[in-house]
Amino acid sequence: MLGTIIDFIVRGITVVLLFGGLILVHEWGHFLVARMCGVRVLRFSIGFGPKIFGWKRGDTEYWLAWVPLGGYVKMAGEDPTNVEGQPWEYAAKAVWQRFLIVFAGPLTNFIIALLLLWVFFAKGYPGILPVVGEVVDDRPAYHAGFQPEDRVVSIDGERTLTWDSMTSIIRVNSDKPLTMQVSRDGELMSMTVTPEGEIVEGPDGEEKTVGLIGVTAGGYPMQIVPAFATSAEMLGHWTVETLKVLGSLATGKRNAKEAVTGPIGIAHLTARTVDAGVGPVLILMALISLSLAIFNCFPIPVLDGGHLFFLIIEAIKGSPVSLKIQERAAMVGMVMLISLAIFVSIMDVSRFFVN
């Protein structure tokens, strides 16, 4: 019993540190660019709520607060109702400077996602790239001549950037010959493989036939430059796929329950992923960081995207959006976010905790 409680506490702390850390670097982006633009930062808080302890350096108070999920940056002149007309205030800066300050948060999350992927590919963790680990004896891949560390570049002319994109093609082509372009030691070769049909039970409990060739996921360390290039390509792929999912949700082509995960679901997945090792944690954190970057760019008031939208309008019309409109928009945005949080939390509970 005691061991279970300790394990639960350790997992909880790990989830808070990982997820909260990604939100914290988002705020650090705002902080850094604000300072570069000459804006006084009155407070940089790690966590929310009342202060546990803190110190002051220069014009900035540094806090450690009680609620350890992320943090916030408080800038002089950020509140339109409390502007003194000083040159070091946020409101006194040019539109392009304020735009950079606001955009720095999502941009930092995007950069962190790129760096996490870079570490992943440089270390050679398995599971993401279509790289062969083990080749099972007497299975289609074995007879076709596959070897460990072979990388599948394309199947029947369709590029396979990830392990999932490779297996998704194989699974729906049982007993059909597939022409695979494979990279081995820097050289391309062509192999013909016919996946064997095998009956498996799906998530809905129904049995179906899928194609398998008898390989496991592998990986290999990459040099710094190729690892960075692969990371950038993967991040671009994820970004495009995320936008496609959002588009399908907006048009009703996809069920939100299948595609949206909130804080509860993220915490649950993170706790499970920690047990799987460093590689899966790096990938999950990269995905979450990218999701935070994209989500914060939504043109919803109270989010960074809402502020960016108002700044774009200000740049076009030559004057700020009226305070009354901003306040009303902020109220609507807050209601939208609270409603969304409740909605995704209910879905997370039904998906992960209710049989």
Image: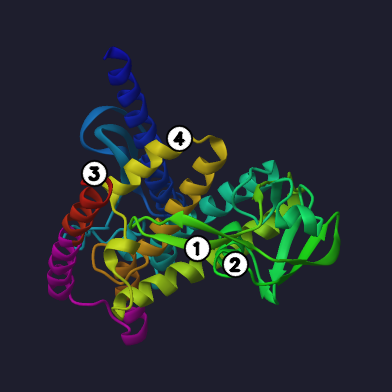
In the rendered view, tell whether residue 116 sits above or below residue 246.
above
Q: Secondary structure at mark 2?
A: loop
| In this picture, residue 322 sits left or right of residue 204 | left
Asked whether 232 falls inside the magenta stretch, the response is no
Q: Circle 2 sits on which residue?
A: 174
Q: Amino acid at mark 1?
A: Thr
| In this picture, residue 10 sits left or right of residue 301 | right
Residue at point 59% right, 68% down?
169
N-terminal of the pair, mark 4 or mark 3, is: 4
Residue at point 49% right, 66% down?
239
State the extent of the magenta-drawn residues as a range. 311-339
Indicate the quadrant where residue 16 lies: top left
Residue 206: x and y, percent? 36, 59
Question: Between marks 4 and 2, how big is the CA–CA gap?
Answer: 34 Å
Q: Circle 4 sits on which residue?
A: 274
- Count all numbered tags in the image, as a single digit: 4
Q: Circle 3 sits on which residue?
A: 353
N-terminal of the pair, mark 3 or mark 2, is: 2
| In this picture, residue 200 sits left or right of residue 329 | right
Q: Secondary structure at mark 3?
A: loop
N-terminal of the pair, mark 4 or mark 2, is: 2
Q: Circle 1 sits on which residue?
A: 209
